[in-house]
Image (cartoon, grey):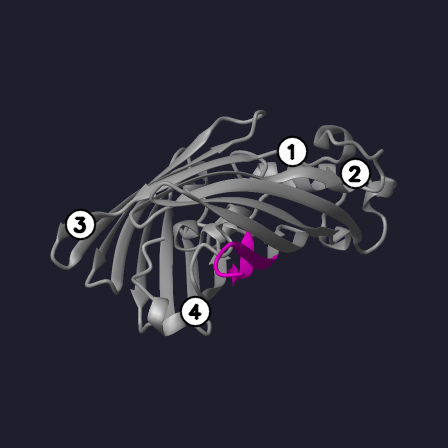
């Protein structure tokens, strides 16, 4: 398992400016469950999202990710539940994740404060026979593929009201590798490292049928430089959203979301790479579709600000 983890991290480092242990997407502001389990159930209806991302087009072995998410409220919006299923492929490595999310909300001032936890399992697969190997006697590269399962647990807090939100999350607080001794310290029990996310956003009225939605995401992993995403989205007639995002040391992203009707929405994002990868690959395409439902859906549905 240790050699498998090292292989995964080394391959990720070759493809990105830092090891990418979490699936990265550009349209997280359209579904906060991608980053924070405390977001689950923050709407009065159930919401689903299906996203696919093709990163660094024309770059051999570039990341490809698919994510399905669903969440909704329970017990008069006092609790929330959610599910995330994802598949991530980088080079000869693949990662499959299944996470259950739970949140509990308390009224605080003009909004609600949510506390969330998540738990699940990640399957790591390395297709060793797809590699070009110089040392044929190295046991790390014998066989057709290697795989391993890791249990993971994380948490977060999320505060929201009608016009703004803020959140903090640690998606992987504890991870357990059966080849390690169990420990509350993730550094001792697995090769996974903690990532810390801070998010926030606000909705401004800029006209009768026009709104602006600035938001920010700060990503920190102690062994790597802190990264910041700055986003600005303009919403027209509560149906069409146009946005631009700057991801430090990585990319500029343009995106559009269309709320086709009360239930259905579709979104697209294009990342313009600014790192050195731009000399070898085209941009990144990402598409997302969403569907909302629930017994109280029609009477409680309002424009989806975040």
Q: Which residue is mark 2?
A: 3
Kindly state the secondary structure of the residue where label 4 is placed.
strand
The outermost residue toward the left is: 208
Quote the CA–CA distance across marks 1 and 4: 34 Å
Residue 49: x %, y % from top left: 48, 63
Q: What residue is rendered at 67% in x and 53% in y?
A: 94
In the rendered image, which quarter contains the N terminus? top right
Q: Which mark is residue 193?
A: 1
Q: Is residue 263 visible?
A: no
Percent across and percent down for residue 285 are: 42, 57
Q: Earlier in the sequence, mark 1 or mark 3?
A: 1
Report the disc number at residue 76. none
Mark 4 or mark 2: which comes first in sequence? 2
Q: Secondary structure at mark 1?
A: loop
**Count of labels in the image:** 4
Mark toward the start of the polypeptide (1 vs 2): 2
In the image, is 62 to the left or to the right of 241? right
Magenta segment's dominant SS is: strand
Front disc: 1 or 4? 4
Q: Residue at x 47, y 28 (%)?
A: 226
Q: Residues within 10 Å of mark 4 (few under 14, many from 20)?
A: some
The residue pinned by badge 3 equals 205
Which residue is under mark 4? Answer: 292
């Amino acid at each position: 398992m240790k050699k498998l983890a090292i292989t995964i991290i080394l391959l990720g480092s070759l493809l990105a400016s830092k090891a990418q242990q979490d699936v990265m997407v550009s349209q997280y502001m359209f579904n906060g469950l991608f980053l924070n389990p405390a977001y689950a159930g923050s709407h009065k209806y159930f919401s689903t999202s299906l996203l696919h991302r093709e990163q660094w087009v024309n770059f051999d072995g570039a990341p490809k990710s698919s994510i399905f998410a669903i969440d909704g409220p329970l017990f008069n919006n006092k609790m929330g539940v959610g599910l995330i299923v994802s598949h991530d492929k980088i080079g000869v490595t693949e990662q499959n994740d299944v996470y259950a999310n739970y949140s509990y909300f308390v009224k605080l001032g003009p909004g609600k404060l949510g506390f969330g936890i998540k738990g699940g399992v990640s399957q790591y697969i390395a297709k060793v026979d797809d590699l070009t190997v110089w040392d044929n006697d190295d046991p790390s590269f014998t066989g057709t593929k290697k795989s391993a399962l890791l249990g993971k647990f994380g948490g977060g807090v999320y505060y929201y009201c009608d016009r703004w939100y803020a959140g903090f999350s640690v998606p992987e607080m504890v991870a357990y590798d059966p080849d390690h001794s169990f420990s509350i310290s993730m550094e001792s029990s697995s090769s996974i490292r903690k990532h810390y996310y801070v998010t926030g956003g606000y909705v401004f009225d800029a006209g009768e049928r026009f709104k602006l939605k600035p938001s920010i995401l700060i990503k920190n992993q102690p062994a790597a430089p802190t990264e910041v995403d700055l986003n600005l989205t303009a919403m027209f007639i509560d149906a069409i959203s146009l946005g631009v995002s700057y991801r430090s040391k990585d990319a500029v992203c343009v995106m559009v979301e269309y709320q086709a009707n009360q239930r259905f929405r579709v979104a697209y994002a294009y990342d313009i790479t600014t790192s050195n990868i731009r000399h070898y690959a085209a941009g990144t395409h990402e598409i997302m579709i969403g569907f909302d439902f629930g017994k109280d859906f029609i009477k409680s549905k309002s424009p989806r600000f975040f």
